Amino acid sequence: MIPYSFSDVQVLVLAAGQGTRMRSAKPKVLHELLGKSMLEHVLITLESLNVAGISIVTGHGSSQVQASINMHHQVGWVLQAEQLGTGHAVQQGELSCADAEHVLIVCGDTPLLRSETLAKLLKEHITSSADISLLSAFQDKPHGYGRVVRDEHGSMLHIVEERDADESTRAIQEVSSGIFCVRKSILFDYLKKVDNNNEQAEYYLPSIVSLAANDGCKLQASQMDDADEMLGINDRSQLRQAIKVLQARVVMDWESQGVSIEQAETVRIDVSVHIGTDTLIRSGTQLLGNTHIGDGCDIGPYAVVDRSWVDDDVNIHAFSHVECAHISMRGEVGPYARLRPDAHLDEGVKIGNFVEIKKAVIGEGSKVNHLSYIGDTEIGKNCNIGAGSITCNYDGANKHRTVIGDDVFVGSGTRLIAPVEVGDGATLGAGSIITRDVQKHGLTLSVRSEQRYVKDWKRATKK
């Protein structure tokens, strides 16, 4: 939690670029890292700062970006119809900054930024009465970034983009993150003075630094502790690198909260996942979307749990796939089981190997142990569903429900042709085909053909 309020700061998020190096029909800032787009990661960080407002500058794919973000975030929108550089992009947001004293300018492709880092930048900017503050970092390999040039006294003079830098300037290891906080009263005046006399013929936002330095403005660079935070994503290789860094953060955070994670480099845990204490996440497991895992669970190896709720003390064994399902306390699933959407397992339910459950409620203490399909079904308490049993729910046009009462024993290889109901305490003989409702208690089985033996019969042989 950020213990400061920056109510006099307006944020502009620059998200207008096409991102041609991504080679995608999707706008660059909508590519995802661990379940959220890179732009959403930036917005979540900014929303914790208690700023006056957030406006997003869009251009390429503007309608796609707005449709994606408006579902979850309250922001303003600014259109940069023609992409002429970062300085030009900021100019388009002048009206949205009318009531602010300071403008924080952030890139929409920097999803690793931490709110603490931005809060430090804003606090230092405001308390020092700086005119322009830059978030910088030292990079061992500064390739691709603008270099921070200082005078002999260490004061910041200007920022030189790499493509415009000479050899000595490229050797500088302090680089610009592209993130600035600028006093609004000077920002847009200086932007009008910026020219596009550079290799790209673009209006660079960092050009305001040298203009302000020449006028004696107070400039400062706030250095971030972790240079990974400024990683900008321009291609899929950089996206992969950022995902790796973000996943390592997520793993460390859960480990600090009492979660054990085997072979963490093989595990995927989305940022919106919750995991309880004393839970073990085994190697190769993926926890996706808004998944909740309770206390004392054992998940995997190589299990996938997607947008599901898992209560305490649940075991999900190897290679099981759980999607939009609910597993109650002390449940056991797999190995090689599949829970499809709207599968609900009550307490103590056992779902065994090669079992598929879809849109079904399995009552407390019931078991579906082997090689079965249960769809559009309600099963009561303490039932046993034998191996290879199937609820035949689809007639080619419509889905029909099967209802099974409490304490029912279904013999192996049984077919229940829905719609059908089975009363409490019933036993269904192995291999039965059930087409009508079954009475409570007693044994029900379909008539079986007589078993015959043909003496001296021989199988055909290959010619």
Image (tube, grey):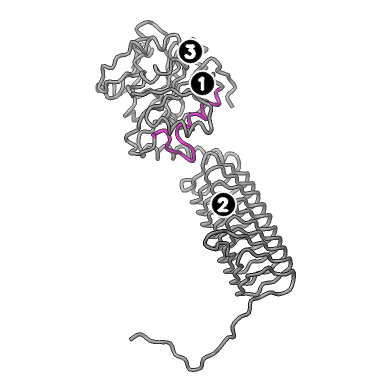
- Tell me where residue 280 appears, x and y as whole percent: 58, 49
- Tell me where residue 199 appears, x and y as whole percent: 25, 22
- Depth check, mark 2 against mark 1: the one in front is 2
Nearer-the-camera pick, 166 or 385: 385
Q: Which residues are magenta?
A: 27-49
Q: Which mark is residue 341?
A: 2
Badge 3 or badge 2: first in the primary sequence: 3
Badge 3 or badge 1: first in the primary sequence: 3
Q: Which mark is residue 98?
A: 3
Q: Secondary structure at mark 1?
A: helix
Q: Which residue is mark 1?
A: 120
Q: CA distance from mark 2 to mark 1?
A: 44 Å
Q: CA distance from mark 3 to mark 2?
A: 48 Å
- Tell me where residue 19 appears, x and y as whole percent: 35, 33
* Circle 2 Cα neighbour tier, 10 Å, few/some/many (<14 / 14–19 / ≥20): some
Residue at image point 37% right, 36% down: 238
Q: CA distance from mark 3 to mark 1?
A: 24 Å
- Tell me where residue 299 appears, x and y as whole percent: 57, 52
